[in-house]
């Protein structure tokens, strides 16, 4: 298996899930500006979307979209407990979480990265996103993990996108989320993933 990633992008969620699952995999860095991989390949020839994460299974099938790939990873290592079994109500609830992260939080950061929107417009988008983060914080009060009583792929994805808040003032006004990010960041598998991507120095 092989994961094409960009340091600190949402592909970090898949990277973390792979390490938490204890699976063997290869990594290849992608320059999202040029769409070239570290070996000189054009990512668009592998994934026409030209985006990360791009995940290649052992049989050569290519998967995209973080919220989908993390579930595949979880199913490849059911003993790791990263997701409930497929077909169960709990799995549906986990998918509900992943969908919310993808559509409300992940995409909510998009306008803030824009090079064309002016600061006033970005401020409106940031206020909308932080209101959603405030609701999320209330739901995480008193909990160590987002879904259930142990680490799941929901935490891998949520952590990966919440890290981006550091570029926009941080989560100091949302201490529950600030503590959550710090707690997940301390997990050995998470540390290894960030070190491997060069976003955390050894």
Image: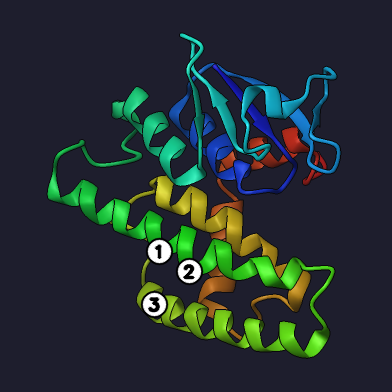
Check residue 53 in the rendering and tell me which mark sits there, or answer none. Answer: none
The residue at which mark 3 appears reads as: 141
Question: Tags 1 and 2 in contact by the CB under 8 Å rule?
Answer: yes
The residue at which mark 1 appears reads as: 100
Residue 127 percent across, percent down from the top left: 61, 88
Q: Residue at x 59, y 59 (%)?
A: 161
Which of discs 2 and 3 lies nearer the camera? The answer is: 2
Going from N to C along the chain, the mark reached first, 2 or 3, is 2
Residue 25 percent across, percent down from the top left: 57, 18
Judge by depth and name the residue closer to the eye, 82 or 9.
9
Residue 151 lies left or right of residue 133; in this view the side is left
Judge by depth and name the residue closer to the eye, 172 or 96.
96
- Residue extending furthest toward the left: 88
Residue 169 found in image quarter: bottom right
The residue at which mark 2 appears reads as: 104
Above or below, 108 against 149 in this view is: below
């Amino acid at each position: 298996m092989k994961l094409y990633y960009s340091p600190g992008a949402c592909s970090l969620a898949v990277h973390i899930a792979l390490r938490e699952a204890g699976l063997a995999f290869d990594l290849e860095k992608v320059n999202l500006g040029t769409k070239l991989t570290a070996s000189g390949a054009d990512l668009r020839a592998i994934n026409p979307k030209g985006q990360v994460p791009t995940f290649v299974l052992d049989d050569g099938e290519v998967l995209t979209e973080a919220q989908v790939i993390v579930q595949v990873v979880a199913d490849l290592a059911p003993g790791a407990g990263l997701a409930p079994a497929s077909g169960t109500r709990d799995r549906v609830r986990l998918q509900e979480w992943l969908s919310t992260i993808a559509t409300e939080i992940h995409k909510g950061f998009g306008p803030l990265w824009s090079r064309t929107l002016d600061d006033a417009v970005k401020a409106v988008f940031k206020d909308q996103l932080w209101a959603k983060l405030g609701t999320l914080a209330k739901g995480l009060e008193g909990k160590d993990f987002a879904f259930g009583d142990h680490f799941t792929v929901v935490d891998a994805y949520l952590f990966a996108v919440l890290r981006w808040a550091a570029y926009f003032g941080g989560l100091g006004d949302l201490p529950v989320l600030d503590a959550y990010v710090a707690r997940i960041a301390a997990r050995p598998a998470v540390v290894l993933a960030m070190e491997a991507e060069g976003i955390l120095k050894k």
